């Protein structure tokens, strides 16, 4: 039933396993999959309760399911708009043993970073994004982009420029390339490096002519010429 996405019926059947327990490990696993079914049906509070119950019983000796429970609790809390609690759950996940799925580990670090980023805890956000980057599991461009944004909040503009240039040079097909071009343009302008700022604003206009950012780039270019006294 679960594999066929009949989650309501799956929850009912898993409940029978709990009602008539034969083996503690089997009952524990049933609780995990019941929690997972609740998650799939967006019943996040029930999912969290179920995962936590699973972690407290014998079935949690299954390392893979135990790790997934921490990870899934984090996402359930995130979907329930509980950012602070989700950070702690994802941190617990990253501290477990047997984390062989580097992509999932990198994703957890990204979610930790995003949580801290949204609450302007910049040092913690930066650390998490660096950890995600170091996994080398497909999140490198995303991690670099948000490292750059975080460096901006920290007024570390040279570091911001460095990581955005890394995206352009190392990940030219990344979906973050255009945003990085725009970030570089604005950052160079803030620094007073008008020639480099013009270069990147012109890239926005030439490489992304249908973008809504073109109008902003044109205004910024005009402002730079005004500041330079070049009328």
Image: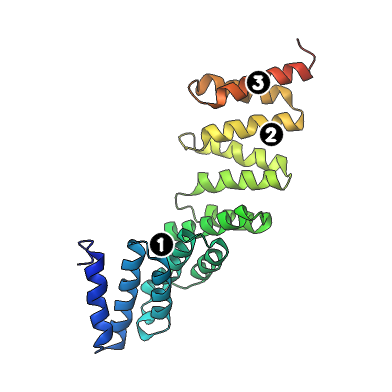
Q: Secondary structure at mark 3?
A: helix
Is residue 211 shown left or right of residue 152? left
Residue designated by label 1: 101
Q: How many marks are shown on the rendered structure? A: 3
Q: Report the residue at 53% width, 63% height from top.
A: 82
Q: Position of residue 166 (x, y in %)?
A: 58, 39
Circles 2 and 1 in contact, beta carbons < 8 Å: no
Residue 147's place in the image compared with 186, above or below, is below
Q: Quadrant of the C terminus?
A: top right
Q: Position of residue 163 (x, y in %)?
A: 61, 42
Crowding at dot 3, Cα within 10 Å, few <14 / some 14-19 / many 20+, comes out as few
* Chain-order first, disc 2 or disc 3: 2
Question: Which one is in front, 35 or 153?
Answer: 35
Q: Looking at the image, what colour scheme do you see?
A: rainbow
Quarter of the picture holding the N terminus: bottom left
Mark 2 crowd level (few <14, some 14–19, many ≥20, 10 Å Cα): many
Query: Could you tell me which residue is drawn at 22 percent across and 76 percent down?
Result: 13
Q: Earlier in the sequence, mark 3 or mark 1?
A: 1
Give the Cα distance between marks 2 and 1: 36 Å
**Which numbered circle lies on residue 187?**
2
Which corner quadrant of the image does residue 203 belong to? top right
Q: Which sits earlier in the primary sequence, circle 2 or circle 1?
A: 1
| CB contact under 8 Å: marks 2 and 3 | no
Q: Is residue 212 left or right of residue 158?
A: left
Q: Which residue is mark 3?
A: 219
Is 111 located above or below residue 145 in the figure?
A: below
Quarter assignment of residue 98: bottom left
Residue 48, position as x, y percentages in the image: 43, 71
Q: Looking at the image, which residue is at 49% across and 60% down?
A: 78
Q: Where, by quadrant of the figure, is residue 130 drawn? A: bottom right
Secondary structure of the residue carrying numbered label 2: helix
């Amino acid at each position: 039933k679960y594999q066929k996405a009949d989650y309501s019926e799956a929850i009912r059947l898993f409940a029978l396993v709990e009602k008539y327990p034969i083996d503690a490990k089997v009952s524990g696993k049933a609780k995990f999959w019941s929690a997972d079914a609740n998650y799939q049906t967006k019943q996040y509070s029930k999912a969290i309760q179920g995962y936590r119950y699973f972690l407290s019983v014998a079935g949690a000796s299954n390392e893979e399911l135990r790790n997934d429970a921490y990870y899934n609790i984090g996402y359930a809390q995130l979907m329930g708009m509980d950012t602070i609690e989700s950070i702690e759950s994802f941190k617990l996940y990253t501290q477990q043993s047997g984390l062989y799925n580097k992509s999932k580990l990198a994703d957890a670090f990204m979610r930790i970073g995003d949580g801290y980023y949204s609450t302007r805890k910049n040092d913690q956000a930066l650390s998490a994004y660096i950890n995600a980057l170091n996994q080398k599991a497909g999140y490198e461009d995303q991690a670099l982009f948000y490292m750059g944004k975080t460096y901006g909040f920290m007024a570390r503009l040279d570091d911001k420029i460095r990581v955005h240039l890394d995206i352009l040079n190392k990940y030219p097909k990344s979906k973050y390339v255009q945003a990085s071009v725009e970030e570089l343009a604005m950052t160079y302008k803030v620094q007073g490096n008008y020639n480099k700022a013009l270069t990147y604003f012109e890239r926005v206009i030439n490489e992304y002519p249908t973008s809504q950012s073109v109008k902003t780039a044109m205004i910024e270019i005009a402002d730079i010429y005004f500041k330079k006294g070049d009328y």
